[in-house]
Image (cartoon, grey):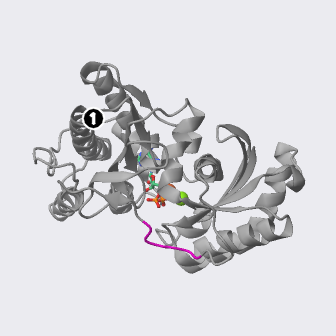
């Protein structure tokens, strides 16, 4: 079955053609990063305008690249949340128009489910599994009893991991988004600044990154005031070690408590090399029998291929939408509190 998938929740306009939820025939990603860089973050109105300009071209490009005709498709998947309302609406409107024009069912997709299902392109998902979702707007541990079922077992109480990377990068004068550059700098430095590891010992699976961010900003400002020299590589390494320590410790603990077959890490921050290496090593050491899956780098950030993978699962479950489908900017998974 061929699905055309559309993603427009933030600053990437993307359209993909996916076969049976696991084979990518095309995955066109038009990034707007350059337009937002001078503002130091994503400007919602600018994002919406770009989506309008790009969406039809991306749809045509995805079909041409995959060499697929609309009549060969069996559905149209689209992200309807979470994300920027104006940005989401462009993708939803395009999906409705395309579905109506070609008489195809409309499949609503949760963007965060999409991030998790990106792992499906590496190997088939097996349940139950635990997913560590780390992205620009989310940091959460999600337990999946079976396909299409999502329960949050822990999440950030304040900033998301990616958000912390971007804010800290701004203080260092790096361009937005700065996760990748901090990752690179961190590999050339040492953990000499000793930033806090918030909530690492607490008996829950929640996270907090705002204290780390404040501590980082104070360190930089104090040094600047006293005219002391800062070693940017060491700052990056110290920040990154703190983030990794907490994410890895809590993820491993959650995986020890829940009966799982696989651990998936997904979302933009899953592209972090330090985090990928450390989590893989810890899983090998502490979770015998658990397979660790992380999508390739190009499928960690926002893309429509992941939306197509999730849409396939929704369609198999008979979850379709009608033309009333609306954007849900704060769409979430169910939370289990113990
Ligand atoms: P969400 O998925 O929560 O709605 P989003 O879609 O904006 O948010 P993603 O595109 O999934 O977020 O991820 C973007 C984030 O990933 C940015 O904060 C960026 O700095 C971060 N990021 C990208 N590469 C790396 C890396 N190598 N190390 C750390 N962070 C990274
Ligand atoms: Mg983005
Ligand atoms: Fe995302």
Is 86 one of the magenta-colored residues?
no
Q: Nearer the viewer, residue 7 or 77?
A: 77
The one nearer the camera, 84 or 79, is 79
Residue in the image at 27% along x and 43% along y: 247
Q: Indicate left or right for 236 with 40 as reference.
A: left
**Dominant secondary structure of the magenta stretch?**
loop
Query: Residue 84, how many percent across, how many down?
Result: 52, 73
User: Image quadrant for the N terminus?
Assistant: top right
Say if residue 50 shows up in the picture: no
Q: Check disc 1 and report its element: helix, strand or loop.
A: helix
Tell me if residue 231 comes above or below residue 190 in the rendering. Answer: below
The image shows residue 308 at horizontal and vertical percentages of: 65, 50
Q: Nearer the viewer, residue 227 or 262?
A: 262
- Which residue does the image show at 49% across and 49% down from the upper left? 148
Give the total of numbered labels: 1
Q: Residue at x 55, y 69 (%)?
A: 36
Residue at 46% in and 46% down: 180
Seen from the viewer's position, the closer of residues 174 and 75 is 75
Q: Quadrant of residue 222?
A: bottom left
**Residue 15 visible from this viewpoint:** yes
Q: Is residue 280 left or right of residue 88?
A: left
Magenta highlight range: 326-331
Position of residue 214 in the picture relative to residue 126 (left or right): left
Spot occupied by residue 111 in the image (x, y as percentages of width and height):
52, 58
Task: Write down the residue under mark 1.
Answer: 255
Q: Horizontally, is 231 left or right of 264 in the view?
A: left
Q: Quadrant of residue 106?
A: bottom right
- Name the spot of residue 71 as percent of width and height, x first: 89, 54
């Amino acid at each position: 079955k061929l699905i055309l998938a559309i993603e427009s929740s933030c600053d990437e306009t993307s359209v993909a053609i996916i076969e049976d939820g696991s084979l990518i025939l095309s995955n066109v990603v038009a990034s707007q990063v350059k337009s937002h860089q001078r503002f130091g973050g994503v400007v919602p109105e600018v994002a919406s305008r770009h989506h309008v300009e790009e969406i039809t071209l991306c749809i045509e490009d995805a079909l041409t690249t995959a060499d697929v005709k609309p009549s060969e498709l069996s559905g149209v998947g689209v992200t309807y949340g979470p994300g920027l309302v104006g940005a989401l609406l462009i993708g939803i409107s395009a999906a409705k128009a395309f579905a109506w024009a070609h008489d195809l069912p409309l499949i609503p997709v949760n963007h965060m489910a999409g991030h998790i299902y990106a792992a499906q392109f590496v190997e088939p998902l097996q349940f139950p599994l635990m997913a560590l979702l780390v992205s620009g707007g989310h940091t959460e541990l999600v337990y999946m009893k079976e396909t299409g079922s999502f329960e949050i077992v822990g999440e950030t109480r304040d900033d998301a991991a990616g958000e912390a990377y971007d804010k800290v990068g701004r203080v260092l004068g790096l361009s937005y988004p700065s996760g990748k550059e901090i990752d690179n700098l961190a590999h050339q430095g040492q953990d000499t600044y000793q930033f806090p590891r918030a909530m690492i010992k607490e008996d829950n699976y929640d996270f907090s990154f705002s204290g780390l961010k404040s501590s980082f900003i104070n360190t930089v400002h104090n040094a600047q005031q006293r005219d002391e020299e800062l070693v940017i590589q060491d700052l990056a390494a110290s920040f990154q070690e703190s983030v990794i320590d907490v994410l890895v410790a809590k993820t491993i603990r959650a995986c020890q408590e829940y009966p799982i077959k696989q651990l998936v890490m997904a979302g933009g921050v899953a592209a972090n090399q330090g985090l990928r290496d450390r989590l893989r090593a810890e899983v090998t050491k502490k979770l015998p029998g658990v397979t660790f899956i992380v999508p390739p780098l190009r499928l960690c950030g926002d893309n429509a291929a992941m939306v197509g993978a999730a849409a396939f699962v929704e369609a198999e479950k008979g979850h379709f939408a009608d033309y009333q489908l609306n954007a849900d900017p704060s769409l979430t998974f169910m939370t289990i509190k113990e």
